[in-house]
């Protein structure tokens, strides 16, 4: 897979044809974990989320893919963006403007019924990005993609201890931001 990603980075579009069959199952698992945290009647299917994330990623022809961990970390980011875009659209259609603030622990549960909370979480993550980009990436991997500490560490090229520390700091910061 790393060879195919490196070839893709070098502009070999044929590498893409061989890549999808090898990673499709892993992408479905990642999307399934992300969607399990959404409301039961979510209109996006696992397949739709995988396809949308994959299409967004392969369009990024200027990305210098390092390895599979880098690719799956980027997938977590894209899946988050897709789910947030979907929540924004749903909120605009059904709820009107104005995001409610909730604690991080309740954000995913609340997002099942009120997409505004997912949008509020995304807005808080955008503010955190200005402070610490790695903490945002850790939240994306752990919270949105359901990755373990070890998987997150591999995806970001960090140690598990660093991931645990930054995960704790990011959760504390987000809890403060999302509190009323």
Image (spheres, rainbow, N blue to C red):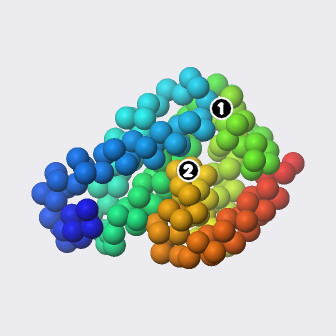
Q: Residue at x 66, y 68 (%)?
A: 164
Residue 30: horizontal and vertical position, in percent?
45, 47
156 horizontally vs 127: left or right: left
Q: Residue at x 17, y 53 (%)?
A: 18
Say few, some or many: other residues with alpha carbon within 10 Å of mark 2 (under 14 / 14 to 19 / 20 or more). many
Of residues 15 and 100, the one nearer the viewer is 15
The answer to whether one can see residue 110 in this image is yes
Verify CB contact (< 8 Å) between mark 2 and mark 1: no
Give the structural element (helix, strand or loop) at label 1.
loop
94 horizontally vs 49: left or right: right
Q: Residue at x 56, y 76 (%)?
A: 159
Q: Quick check: 100 above or below 160?
A: above
Say few, some or many: other residues with alpha carbon within 10 Å of mark 1 (under 14 / 14 to 19 / 20 or more). many
Single out the mark in the foreground, 2 or 1. Answer: 2
Residue 98: horizontal and vertical position, in percent?
74, 39
29 horizontally vs 133: left or right: left
Choose top left, top right, bottom left or bottom right for residue 171: bottom right
Q: Quick check: 156 above or below 143?
A: below
Circle 1 sits on which residue? 112
Choose top left, top right, bottom left or bottom right for residue 100: top right
Of residues 72 and 102, the one nearer the viewer is 72
Residue 65: horizontal and vertical position, in percent?
32, 69
In the drawing, what numbered circle is on residue 62?
none
Q: Residue at x 56, y 36 (%)?
A: 36
Residue 109: horizontal and vertical position, in percent?
70, 37
The answer to whether one can see residue 93 in this image is no
Mark closer to the chain start, 2 or 1:
1
Circle 2 sits on which residue? 146
Farthest-out residue, right:
180
Which quadrant is home to the N terminus? bottom left
Alpha carbon of mark 2 to alpha carbon of mark 1: how far?
16 Å
């Amino acid at each position: 897979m790393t060879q195919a990603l490196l070839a893709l980075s070098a502009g070999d579009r044929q590498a893409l044809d061989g890549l999808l069959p090898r990673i499709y199952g892993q992408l479905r698992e990642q999307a399934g974990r992300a969607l399990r945290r959404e409301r039961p009647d979510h209109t996006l299917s696992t397949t739709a989320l995988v396809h949308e994330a994959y299409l967004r990623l392969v369009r990024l022809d200027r990305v210098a893919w390092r390895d599979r961990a880098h690719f799956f970390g980027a997938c977590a980011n894209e899946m988050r963006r897709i789910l947030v875009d979907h929540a924004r659209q749903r909120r605009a259609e059904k709820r009107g403007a104005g995001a409610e603030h909730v604690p991080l622990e309740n954000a995913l549960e609340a997002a099942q019924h009120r997409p505004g909370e997912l949008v509020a979480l995304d807005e808080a993550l955008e503010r955190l990005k200005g402070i610490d980009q790695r903490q945002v990436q850790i939240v994306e991997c752990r919270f949105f993609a359901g990755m373990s500490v070890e998987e997150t560490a591999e995806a970001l090229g960090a140690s598990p201890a660093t991931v645990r520390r930054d995960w704790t700091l990011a959760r504390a910061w987000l809890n403060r931001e999302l509190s009323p």
